[in-house]
Amino acid sequence: MAEFEYHVEVRNLSTWFGKKAILKNISCYFEDNTVTAIMGPSGCGKSTLLRSLNRLNDLVPSFRMEGEVLFGGQNIYSPGSSVYDLRKRIGMIFQRPNPFPMSIYDNIAYGPKLHGTKDEDELDKIVEESLKKAALWDEVKDDLEKPAPNLSGGQQQRLCIARALSVDPPVLLADEPVSALDPISAAKIEELLIELKSDYTVILVTHNVQQAFRVSDQSAFLYLGELVEFDKTQRILEAPADERTEAFITGRIG
Amino acid sequence: MATQLEHYLKEIQKRLAKLHELTGKSLMDSMQAFKELDQDLAHKVKELSTEIERLSEKIESNVFETIARRQPVAKDLRKLSVYLQISHSLFRVGRYSYKIAHITNLCENKEHFKELQSLPFLAELAKKTLDIAMKGILEEDLSEIDQLEKMEAESDRETSEMFEEIAQYLRERDDIEEMAMFYIIVGRYCERAADQAFLIAEKAVYMITGERKKLGLAYRGSSSQAPH
C-alpha cells in the first residue's frame, strides 16, 4: 500500500472531552471516491470521529486528542498545519441545513470569494457547476438572487452541499445530513451522495442503518468509542464479523 | 418481546417445517408406490405435489413481504435468502416425487422383473440427507453435516451397483427394456433429490456461519466416476 494513497487516514486516534474518553485508539482509512458510513448508537463517538477529520473539535476548549489524522499524507494536527486550508479541502454538511442569510448566488460564491476568486465570470461558472453537482440548478437557476432561507428544507440542504462543493474539496463530511428532512428530500440527498463519490470522497455519519447500507461502499461501526468493525458495506450487511455489529444492525441494541 | 421481524421469521420457519414434512412424505410415498406399483398411492403423491407447490409459493411470498416490510440485514437477511432458495429446493424434491408417481402410473398392468432394493435404499438415503440438511435450517444444528459425505459415497456405490445389475439383466433378458429404463430414471430422481438436500445443507452452513462452503465429494474431486 502506497503511504499516501488515501486522502484521509486515521491512526491510533483517541480523544477526550475533559476527562471523558470518547474515541479509543481508532485506526482506519477512507478510500478515495467512496462513500463511507460511520454508524453506531447515540453517544458512541461517531460525530466526534467525523469532526476530528477537519478539526472541528478544536473549537471545544476541553477537547484533547492523541494519534494522527492524515490528509494527503500530512498529519492535520501537526504544528503549523493550517485549519483554514484544511477546511477548504475537507467540506462539511451538517444535520440541519444552515444557509447564510443572503441570496442563493451569494451562498455559493461566498467560499470562492473568501479564497480569493474575484472574477465574476469565474464565480458565475462556479455557482452554476456547484448547483448542478448538487442537483439543484434546474430548480433555482431563475431565482439565484432570491434569499436562500426561502428554499424548502431539502433544497436548503442541497444548497449547503453546493456551497461545500464550491471550493472543490476532495473530501466531503456529512453529519446526519438528512435526519431533519422529509423522506423525499432525504432520498434526493442520498442519491446525490452516491453520485458525488465519482468526484469526491464522502464520509457520512448516520444513525440510520438502512441509510448507511443504501449509500455507502464501506461502513464503520463504533460502539462505546471503539471501532468495532470497518469493512465493505456488502460484507457487513450480509455477515458482520462482530456480534456487537450484528446486534446493532439488526436492531437488537441501539 | 419478540420483534415483528422475529415473528415473520418464525412463521416462515413453521411453513418450511411443514414443507419439509410434506416433501419427505411425498418422496417416501412415491417410492413405496413405485415399489408396490400402487396406483392409489401414486395418485395421492400427485395430489400432495399440488399442496407442496402452493406452500412453496406461499413461503416465497412471505419472504418477499418480510424483506420489503422489515428490511432485514446480517443473519436475518441470510435466513430469508436461504428460506427462499430452500423452499424452491424442497419444491424440486416434490416434483421428483411427482415424476416417480407418474412413472408408477405408466407401469399400470406391468410387473417388476426383480425385487426392488436399491431404489428404496436410495430414496431412504435422500430422505436422510434431507432431514440432516433441514435440521441445520430449522434448528440451526450442523452437528450431523459431516455424515453427508459418507451418505453420498453410499449413494454413489449403490447407484453404480444398481446400474451394473440392470445392465446384466438387460444382457440376459429382452422383455424388460421399458421397466429397466424406469429403474434408471427413478434412480436418477432419487439422486437429484439428494443433490437438492446437499444444496440445502450448504445453505444451512451459510445461513448460520455467513461462510459459503461447498459440501460433497464432487467438490473435493473424489466422487464416483459412474455414469449417473
Image: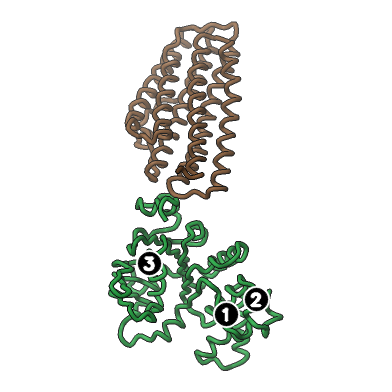
Question: Considering the numbered disc 1 on the image, is that residue within a helix, a strand or a loop?
Answer: loop
The chain letter corresponding to brown is B
Question: Considering the numbered disc 3 on the image, is that residue within a helix, a strand or a loop?
Answer: loop
Residue at the image position 33 percent from the left and 68 percent from the top: A22
- Chain letter, disc 3 residue: A
Same chain for mark 2 and mark 3? The answer is yes
Same chain for mark 3 and mark 1? The answer is yes
Q: Where is residue A160 in the image (x, y as percent from the top left)?
A: 56, 77
- Chain letter, disc 2 residue: A
Name the amino acid type tagged 2: Leu
Query: In the image, is A150 to the left or to the right of B183?
Result: right
Q: Position of residue B66 (x, y in %)?
A: 54, 44
Q: Do the residues labelled 2 and 1 touch (CB within 8 Å)?
A: yes
Would residue B210 be visible to someone looking at this image? Answer: yes
Which residue does the numbered mark 3 point to in the structure image? A45
Query: In the image, is A200 to the left or to the right of A82?
Result: right
- Which label is found at residue A99? 1
Farthest-out residue, front: B1
Q: Tell me the shade of chain A.
A: green
